[in-house]
Image (tube, rainbow, N blue to C red):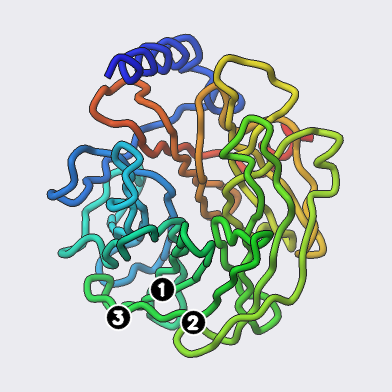
Amino acid sequence: MMRKILQYILDRLVYFLYRNSVVIGNFSHFWCNIPIPISYPQQSQTHPSILYIKQGWNGATHWLGTTPYPNAQIEYENPCIYYANVLNEELPIRFIPIEKNPILDWPGGDCFNSDIELYYADNVLYSIIREYDNSTLSKKLKVQYSEDGQHWSKSRLFFETIDPKQELLSPSIIQHKGKLRLYCLNGDAGISKRGNCTGIHILEGDDLKQSAFKEIATGIFTNKEQVRIEPWHCCLFEYQQKLYMLFCGRDHKQKTFRSPMETYLAVSEDYQNFYIYEKPIVAHIKTYRPSAYIDGDQLHLYFSVVGYIDNFHEDRRIGYTCLNMKELLKILQ
C-alpha cells in the first residue's frame, strides 16, 4: 500500500508540473469517460482501439474497444466495447458500454487476453484479441464479429505461434492491395528499462470471418539505432498515400527515476519499414498503446496512461487530443 501511495504522489507531482505541455505544441488534452464492467474492482482503462464511422452505424459514430486492467490483474484484462454518437463540435470523450461487457471472458490459468484491435467493413464490426499463455509461450490471435455492436460471435482462432521471437504485440490492421494486413511488434521494450523492440511481423489474410492469416514479411525501424527509441505498442492509420504508426516507446537517451514511455509517430512509404520521428507527441507521463483516426487533416488521438495522475481510484486511464496532421508533421520534421 505504501508503494502505491508513493507512486501516486510521484505521478501527481509529474503531472502537475507538466500538465500544460503533455501534448506537443501545448495543445489541450481531455480525459475520457469509459465505465468498466460493474463487477470489476476499480476504474482502470487501457489499450484503446477507436473507430470513427462518419455516416454512423447502429446509432453511433464512434466505437471503442479497451481492455480494463485494474491493479494489473490479468483476470480483468478482457475486451470491452463502447460507443458514442458525437454531434457537431462535441468532444468524442464520453462513451456508453454495450449491454454485456466483456465480450470475451478470461481464458483462465496462465493465459490472459490483451491488445484489442477493432476493424469495420461491410456493416460488420470485428474485435481482434491476443491470447497469451505464460506456460507454453503460445500466442494466439482470435477474432469476434458483430452486426449490431451489442451481440458478438464466439471467438475464432486465425493465427498462432510458439516462436519466442514472435510476440504478436498490439496487432494493428489495415486493408492493403485487396488483402487484410496485420502488423505486430516484437520485443520487451515495455517490460525492462533496457528492453528493445526486435522488429515488426506482418501477417496477411483474405477476411476475418473465415480466413487463416500467414506471415508475409518482417519490417524494421530504419533509424531506431540513431534515435535510440524502442517501440512497444502501436496503431496504424493512412494519410496522403503513406502509412503512419503511432506507438508508445522507450527513449534510452533519457535517464530518469521512472523510465519514460512516451507516444511517438513513425512513417512508412513502402508499408513495411518505418522511420521514427524523434520528438514525442505525448510526453512527461507514462503512456501505453495509442489509437487514432484521421478526419480530413485532423488527427484524433487517444492515448492510454499508466499511473494515477489525479485520481487515486484510477491506475490507468485514456486521454484524448486533436491535432492538425499537416502542422504536426511540420513540428516533427
CB contact under 8 Å: marks 3 and 2: no
CB contact under 8 Å: marks 1 and 2: yes
Q: Vertical placement of 162 versus 239: above or below?
A: below
The three-letter amino acid code for the residue at tag 2 is Leu
Helix, strand or loop at disc 1? strand
Q: Is residue 50 left or right of residue 260?
A: left
Residue at horizontal 39%, vertical 44%?
46
Residue ID for mark 2: 208
Residue at horizontal 74%, vertical 54%?
199
What is the spatial separation of the Cα atoms under label 3 and label 2, in whole angstroms? 12 Å
**Residue 90 visible from this viewpoint:** no
Image coords of residue 252 (percent x, y): 72, 28
Image coords of residue 2 (percent x, y): 30, 14
- Residue 57's quadrant in the figure? bottom left
User: Could you say which disc has been placed on residue 153 in the image?
Assistant: 3
Dot 3 alpha-carbon crowd within 10 angstroms: few under 14, some 14 to 19, many 20 or more: some
Helix, strand or loop at disc 2? loop
User: Could you say which disc has been placed on residue 126 in the image?
Assistant: 1
Q: Residue furthest bottom?
A: 210
Counting the numbered discs, the total is: 3
Helix, strand or loop at disc 3? loop
User: Could you say which disc has been placed on residue 89 in the image?
Assistant: none
Q: Is residue 271 left or right of residue 158?
A: right
Q: Vertical placement of 206 versus 115: above or below?
A: below
The three-letter amino acid code for the residue at tag 1 is Tyr
Sequence-wise first label, 1 or 3: 1
Which quadrant does the C terminus fall into?
Answer: top right
Dot 1 alpha-carbon crowd within 10 angstroms: few under 14, some 14 to 19, many 20 or more: many
Residue at horizontal 29%, vertical 53%?
75
